[in-house]
Amino acid sequence: NALIRGSLADIATRSGASLAESFVGVDVVVLLDVSGSMHIPDSRGGRRRYDVALEELAQLQANMPGKIAVIGFSNYPEFAPNGKPAFQGGNTDLAKALQFARMADIVGMRFIVVSDGQPDDEREALNVAATYKGRIDCVYVGPETDLHGQEFLNRLACAHGGQKVTADRVQQLAAKIETLLLSAR
């Protein structure tokens, strides 16, 4: 797997530091939905949401080198130090992803959930999120007509001091995440 420029693994490789040392500079953890719904080819140029999300995340990591940790989630969460989470194509176990990411929940850390907003168990995801100290922002990446997915992500963000924004079918995801990061300063 190629390293995304600006990813944690790229920073570690270029600086000669360990991956753990490169994580010290992280400001935000992006939890990217890599479930089956991200395979839908309704994004920019008729491409899959997943592929466009990877392009957008690569742009974001290049603009903010070493500041973003990426976790992909579907049936299980997976840390992606190379900046490119693998497509899993399964369910959307957001609760498990939030449990996994909680190890990074330290003072000042931000979390951004990027999803179409339809987790396997909404209540469990909200319960796990309730244990967080850090802010949780959400970026909705499904079609604008899916009000249920948007409503869930709005509830998740509002419950944890965050905001919910929409990047319709993943388009302009990097810009939306940058907007969230700037709005909290």
Image: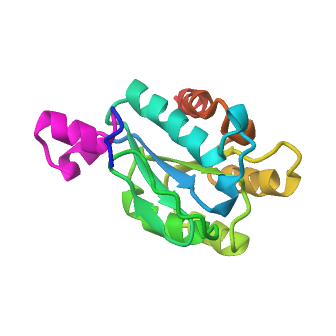
Q: Is residue 76 left or right of residue 126?
A: left
Asked whether residue 24 appears in the rendered view, the answer is no
Q: Which range is magenta? A: 6-25
Against 170, residue 131 (above or below) is below
Towards the viewer: 51 or 166: 51
Please give the name of the residue rendered at 70% of the width and 45% of the height, measured from the top-left corner: 141
Magenta-span inclusion, residue 10: yes
Residue 66, percent from left and from top: 31, 36
Towards the viewer: 123 or 53: 53
Q: Is residue 13 left or right of residue 128?
A: left
Magenta-span inclusion, residue 175: no
Asked whether residue 35 appears in the rendered view, the answer is yes
Please give the name of the residue rendered at 26% of the width and 45% of the height, measured from the top-left corner: 9
Please give the name of the residue rendered at 69% of the width and 33% of the height, measured from the top-left corner: 44
- How is the rendered protein coloured? rainbow
Residue 42, percent from left and from top: 75, 43
Residue 1, percent from left and from top: 33, 49
Towards the viewer: 34 or 68: 34
Q: Count numbered badges in the picture.
A: 0
Q: Is residue 3 left or right of residue 22?
A: right
Residue 148, percent from left and from top: 85, 57
Against 125, residue 83 (above or below) is above
* Magenta segment main secondary structure: helix
Please give the name of the residue rendered at 30% of the width and 43% of the height, measured from the top-left corner: 8
